[in-house]
Amino acid sequence: MRSLINEIESIEPVEVYGRVVGVQGLLVEISGPVHEMSVGSRLSIEGGAGNPVLAEVVGFRDERALCLPFSGLQGVRMGCRAVLEERESVLRISDEWLGRVVNAMGEAIDGNGTLSRGGDVRQLRASPPAAADRARVGGPIDLGVRALNTFVTCCRGQRMGIFAGSGVGKSVLLSMLAKNTAADVAVIGLIGERGREVQEFVQDDLGPEGLQRSVVIVATSDESALMRRQAAYLTLATAEYFRDQGLNVLCMMDSVTRFAMAQREIGLAAGEPPTSKGYTPTVFTELPRLLERAGPGVVGSGSITGLFTVLVEGDNHNEPVADAVRGILDGHIVMERAIAERGRYPAINVLKSVSRTMPGCVAAEALPVLREARRLMSTYADMEELIRLGAYRRGSDATVDLAIDRHDGLEAFLAQRKDEASTIETGYGELANLLEMSLG
């Protein structure tokens, strides 16, 4: 009943519409009562064969509204009516979304029937909780991945970036995290994903057990920039819905880079000037607005632990989007192609990975073990070329000799099969045994 009442209240008492006066590429210019429209308003443009095209206002120019469509513009012609449907971007999310795969419009695409609309209206571009009202991050969260649990320990409500080039194994790492992380609900956004990989991820990587507690939001690479951007907004809005119920949510997005690319397309179409590497200024405005929505909720509510992948172009970890995201998040996980080429998966470089909350959430008795492991790995990394060339003579340095002795064991410790899970306590224990040390 509440959903029906909200639906009735949202009906516009007067139909407001304009007319198409220009189309350039995917940009549609609408004239008419533009004072009734705002950035983010939804318009339904008459298309061919009676199929309307949904579009969103992205700007204004010379008393005309500039719109981008959510789909193709086939059948749109000069003079077509553009009816104002919604004045702001909202969706109604419900508990029925659990275990389902939906698109950026909140429509089920898994063939298991339609979804009923929830009673509460959720803003797609909601503001994050006020800084003064937010709770602090919680205790350590078990991610189920040994390399991360031990060397890049993450707290509940933390936001981490997974930085990797293409084909290094970040999607497989995401599937391990989705299945093994200790969270009440997982919200997974596949932004600009390859179409063939969606079913593989849902059926093989996530599996029925993982899907049961998850919501998967999909916008494939062939969909419009608006759909890809909206899928990212919907991912955070869904995570906020479950967080406000007091649940601890794992929010994963693959990838933030494709969200930035979608925003770049939208900005360029609206006439924004390109700046660094062609990215428009709004890209670097929208990134913190999106990512800050993850994290702890207000005191007494749940939390959103965010894991966001960043596709680094040409393995350049200092490209503009990666650099901006690294400054916003609470840590970064670096995956390297050279490690993957050696056959060690997940290909995480723990020496270059950082968790900014880790010092405060690791047990005191485990710190000496972690420091010793890092010292040996760092020593081996510094001398690796000399060791492989045979230029290092054993006995020259006791620390290097110990690093060589422990190297194979540490590499085996960091490797993990896709179907294997490891707890934080087990990881610390195995590492202590490997280094022949005790945990207090």
Image: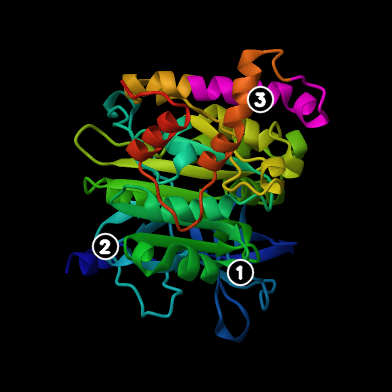
Whether residues under marks 1 and 2 lie with C-beta atoms below 8 angstroms apart, the answer is: no
* Badge 2 vs badge 3, beta-carbon distance below 8 Å: no
Residue 142, horizontal then vertical, whole percent: 35, 41
Q: Residue at the location (30% across, 68% down)?
A: 117
Q: Is residue 137 magenta?
A: no
Residue placed under numbered mark 1 in the picture? 195
- Say whether disc 2 or disc 3 marks the residue closer to the N-terminus: 2
The first of marks 3 and 1 along the sequence is 1
Q: How is the image coloured?
A: rainbow
In-front residue for pair 380/125: 380
Evaluate whether residue 352 shows in this view: no
Instruction: Point out the frontmost of discs 3 and 1.
Output: 3
Q: What is the three-letter code of the residue carrying label 2?
A: Asp
The prevailing secondary structure element of the residues shown in magenta is helix
Q: In which quarter of the image is residue 406?
A: top right
Q: What residue type is labelled 1?
A: Gly
Residue picked out by circle 3: 380
Whether residue 260 is visible, yes or no, is yes
Real-space CA distance between mark 3 and mark 1, rounded to the nearest whole angstrom: 41 Å
- Rendered view: 370 above or below 19: above
- The reply to whether callout 3 and callout 1 are in contact (CB within 8 Å) is no
Q: In this view, does 212 lie above or below 159?
A: below
> Looking at the rendered structure, which numbered label has been put on residue 95?
2
Task: Find the magenta span and give its range.
Answer: 372-393
For mark 3, give the secondary structure: helix
Asked which secondary structure carries label 1, the reply is: helix
